[in-house]
Amino acid sequence: MRSFLICMTMLSKTFAYALRAVTYVAVHSKEGKKVNLEQLSEGIDVPQPFLGKIMQDLVRQGVLKSMKGPGGGFWTDEFSLKLPAFEILNATDGYAVLTSCLMGKKNCNSSLPCPLHAEYALCRDTLFDALRNTRISDLAQKVEAKEIFLAEDN
Amino acid sequence: MRSFLICMTMLSKTFAYALRAVTYVAVHSKEGKKVNLEQLSEGIDVPQPFLGKIMQDLVRQGVLKSMKGPGGGFWTDEFSLKLPAFEILNATDGYAVLTSCLMGKKNCNSSLPCPLHAEYALCRDTLFDALRNTRISDLAQKVEAKEIFLAEDN
DNA sequence: CGAATAAAAGATAATAATATCTTTTTATAT
DNA sequence: ATATAAAAAGATATTATTATCTTTTATTCG
Ligand code: FES
Ligand code: FES
């Protein structure tokens, strides 16, 4: 009678939502359009109020731009587009996930490694590299090129 | 005023505790000793009642053996020692974490990949390989060889 | 200016993960 | 058999994460 709903993704839902949101906004910004919360929420299939909070964080951390009022919304400028996806992690979950021990030791270090350190460090580094080397503009470009939808149902 | 307590490890605390617990038990089993919950809880620095639940799961899933009553406790037999660490994940969080999409798409597949699929699949595979290729006996052996402690404070 | 639009912020609620406490069952030893 | 030790199971509590609702503030446009 196990539920198997425990920690289905390695990272948080918040981070997954943020990745989708930023990518969606970036695609539309390239077409010169701002995106408002309602449109975004529908476009990436994330509950609007929760998404609002995530967007706040992303703007506060400088990952996105926003403007209130009529015709307002979210967009990416040249600066944003050049940022690595790592900044999205940084603005949501934080990067501690990339430095912490798989077996839960207080400090992960190779001088007193846990039995899975070497292997896990490799795993983390692969993700770290991916998030470092992929820019927000790359995310948008891949979506455009492959015509992938960002809504969850696919 | 962010808290940064969100999802500090990629996987759950439960899984981290289970890895430490099984390793601790395996080390002591090699010396022909059973381990009871109280000793284990102190040895790996995990709250006893919560650990009890995790141990139940591990026994139920066949990763460990247990016996009630005086002189009872937990141990690993030859079968257990040969199991890959993957079975510990399977008995706690489940393996869904190794097949789910980083960006939260319902299905992760390479025919309709999200913009980070290739990179993330690599990251997951690294972890998967590590958990497949490391047996419980290997975990114990590494602890013995390097005299590493499994309690959190190091 | 005043009305309308849209994000920001604040307060509250639901769910899942983690932790604790109590009772029951099973085995051992005297 | 009885007492004792120890895991299993059940019930409850706490905390973190995810989600929702309401109010406030900023911007645009007539
Ligand atoms: S010490 Fe455990 S992952 Fe580095
Ligand atoms: S589709 Fe996103 S990780 Fe595979």
Image (cartoon, coloured by chain):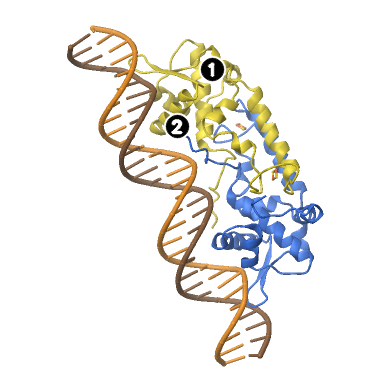
Chain colours: A blue, B yellow, C orange, D brown
Other residues around mark 1 within 10 Å, as few (<14) / some (14–19) / many (≥20): some
Subunit of label 1: B
Question: Mark 2 or mark 1, which is nearer the start of the sequence?
Answer: 2
Q: Position of residue B14 (x, y in %)?
A: 50, 35
Q: Amino acid at mark 2?
A: Val
Instruction: State if disc 2 and disc 1 touch (CB < 8 Å).
Output: no
Q: Position of residue B135 (x, y in %)?
A: 61, 20
Determine which quarter of the picture holds residue D10.
top left
Residue topped by disc 1: B80
Q: Amino acid at mark 1?
A: Ser
In the image, taking residue D23 as reference, residue A47 lies left or right, namely: right
Does the Cβ of the disc 1 residue fall within 8 Å of ligand 1?
no
In the image, taking residue A114 as reference, residue B51 lies left or right, namely: left
Subunit of label 2: B
Residue topped by disc 2: B46
Q: Position of residue B137 (x, y in %)?
A: 58, 17
Q: Position of residue A62 (x, y in %)?
A: 67, 61
Q: Which residue ends up furthest to the right in the rendered image?
A: A145
